Amino acid sequence: MHERSLVQALIRQVEEVVREERSSDTKQPRITEVCVAIGPLSGVEPVLVQNAFQQLKTGSRLAEACLKMDKTPLQASCRDCGALCTIESFQFVCSVCRSRSLQVVSGDEFKLLAVTVDESHDQPAEQC
């Protein structure tokens, strides 16, 4: 289950981003949401990512955070005609010229998109 190690790295990345952005603040902001992009060729199982996040966030600055996962479509550029195609059902064929000479341009990623923080500390965090 490599999702666990990916989520550990994600948590470290989020903590570092918040630390860099808030380096002059004395208050530690509450992280309320982490948004990631997951593509169908990423080799990552969203359910396992969610489970690992729920387990690993405990005791970290992300303890109250929700994980939002945006599924990235699988897209490829045709090397023959230059068209950008959305790949459905893993059929790697250009929708314009029917060529099979394609280069994947999105859909293989697992990456951090955004971190939402709450500066107020007055309100309890919303439930995920």
Image (tube, grey):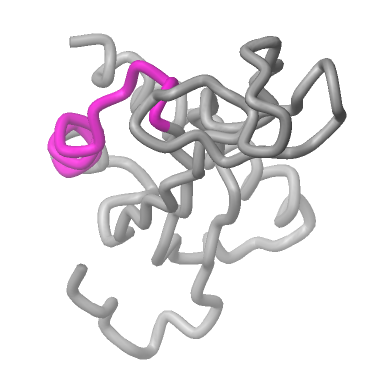
Residue drawn at the location 57% of the way across and 65% of the way down:
27
Where does residue 61 sit, x and y in percent of width and height? 39, 48
Q: Nearer the viewer, residue 68 or 99?
A: 99
Where does residue 69 sit, x and y in percent of width and height? 37, 50
Q: Left of 10 or right of it: where is 27?
A: right
Q: Left of 82 or right of it: where is 7?
A: left
**For the view shown, which residue lies furthest in the bottom direction?**
122
Q: Main secondary structure of the magenta part?
A: helix
Residue drawn at the location 79% of the way across and 36% of the way down:
83
* Quadrant position of residue 82: top right
* As drawn, 110 above or below 72: above
Where does residue 91 sit, x and y in percent of width and height? 43, 24
Q: Quadrant of the N terminus?
A: top left
Q: Is residue 16 magenta?
A: no
Count every numbered label the image shows and give the total: 0
* Quadrant position of residue 30: bottom left
Q: Is residue 42 magenta?
A: yes
* Quadrant position of residue 6: top left
* Range shown magenta: 40-54
Q: Left of 116 or right of it: where is 81?
A: right
Where does residue 79 sit, x and y in percent of width and height? 82, 16
Q: Quadrant of the C terminus?
A: bottom left
Residue drawn at the location 74% of the way across and 39% of the way down:
84
Residue drawn at the location 50% of the way across and 43% of the way down:
73
